Image (cartoon, rainbow, N blue to C red):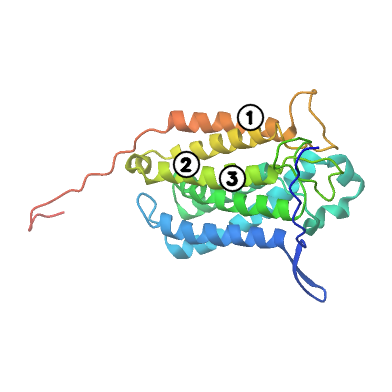
């Protein structure tokens, strides 16, 4: 029998005060949004955006709505539409889990488009800034998945396999931790290394493209060892829904990387003193 690491029994409920319940899952979203808010204020103040920190505060309201609405609607449409058509009130029970990153990404993208259009900002320059901080939320979200004992991996005999409380008696890949490492830590390092290079500031969409391709590659790779959703199964007996949704992400990412062209800074017109403007 292969060695199995005991699954840490962590209560999904962090704090409970009567009817008021704070779950790790909710805390993960709060940590991701707060961490993103702090870094967007910092990165957005730099060229070429130079966005007002007060405007960033305003955007976080848009982003929160985009994440929650997009994530939930995406999960309903992509992963369990027949069930929710029969039980429509279950759609509102977000606290029971069931969020789609791809849906949340689409929701935030719509929020960013509307926000930048209202503020007169460059859409791609703003998405570059948001792409730098998004892995923070992905990291905390996957850690919350692990604590909840959900979205486990497929059966395996690797030395670090775990038996999840709701995953049967067989040891499985802790795929949530794989995703936390790849989609969270590794992707954060990569996009921020690109963002620290001087040329990216003059190539709107470059960082966004790196993020989209990197996430799609990381998610698609982990899906090979992550247990696919029973209600969806393997599409055409070959590919998971997560992999299918990641393909257009990767293609769009490659396109944005390819099309990002240097944007020259406007030259400063140095006029001699006393010259009429």
User: Closer to us: mark 2 or mark 1?
Assistant: 2
User: Residue 91, position in %: x, y?
Assistant: 82, 52
Q: Which residue is mark 2?
A: 190
In contact (CB < 8 Å): disc 3 and disc 2? no
User: Residue 193, position in %: x, y?
Assistant: 41, 43
- Say what secondary structure mark 3 lies in: helix
Marker disc for residue 180: none
Q: Which residue is mark 1?
A: 247
The earlier-in-sequence mark between 3 and 2 is 3
Identify which residue, 50 or 36, lies in the foreground: 36
Identify which residue, 5 or 140, lies in the foreground: 5
- Say what secondary structure mark 2 lies in: helix
The answer for how far apart the CA atoms under marks 3 and 1 are is: 20 Å
The image quadrant that residue 59 belongs to is bottom right
Residue placed furthest toward the bottom: 18
Q: Which residue is mark 3?
A: 181
Identify which residue, 144 or 205, lies in the foreground: 144
The answer for how far apart the CA atoms under marks 2 and 1 are is: 20 Å
- Left or right of 201? Residue 8 is right
- Left or right of 48? Residue 66 is right
Q: Residue at x 28, y 43 (%)?
A: 265
């Amino acid at each position: 029998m292969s060695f199995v690491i005991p699954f840490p029994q962590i209560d999904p409920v962090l704090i409970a005060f009567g009817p008021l319940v704070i779950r790790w899952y909710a805390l993960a979203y709060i940590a991701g949004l707060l961490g993103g808010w702090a870094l967007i204020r910092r990165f957005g103040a730099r060229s070429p955006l130079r966005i007002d920190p007060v405007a960033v505060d305003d955007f976080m309201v848009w982003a929160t709505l985009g994440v929650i609405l997009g994530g939930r609607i995406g999960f309903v449409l992509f992963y369990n539409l027949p069930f929710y058509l029969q039980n429509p009130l279950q759609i509102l029970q977000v606290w029971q889990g069931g969020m789609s990153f791809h849906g949340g990404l689409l929701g935030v993208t719509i929020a960013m488009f509307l926000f930048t259009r209202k503020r007169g900002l460059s859409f791609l320059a703003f998405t570059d800034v948001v792409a730098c901080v998004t892995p923070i939320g992905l990291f905390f979200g996957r850690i919350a998945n692990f604590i909840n004992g959900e979205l486990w991996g497929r059966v395996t005999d690797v030395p670090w396999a775990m038996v999840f409380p709701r995953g049967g008696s067989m040891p499985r890949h802790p795929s949530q931790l794989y995703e936390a490492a790849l989609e969270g830590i590794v992707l954060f390092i990569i996009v921020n290394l690109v963002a620290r290079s001087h040329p990216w500031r003059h190539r709107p969409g470059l960082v966004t493209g790196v993020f989209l391709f990197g996430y799609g590659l990381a998610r698609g790779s982990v899906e090979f060892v992550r247990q696919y959703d029973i209600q969806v199964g393997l599409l055409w007996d070959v590919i998971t829904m997560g992999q299918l949704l990641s393909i257009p992400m990767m293609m769009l990412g490659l396109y944005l990387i390819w099309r990002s062209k240097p944007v020259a800074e406007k030259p400063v017109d140095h006029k001699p003193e006393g010259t009429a403007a």
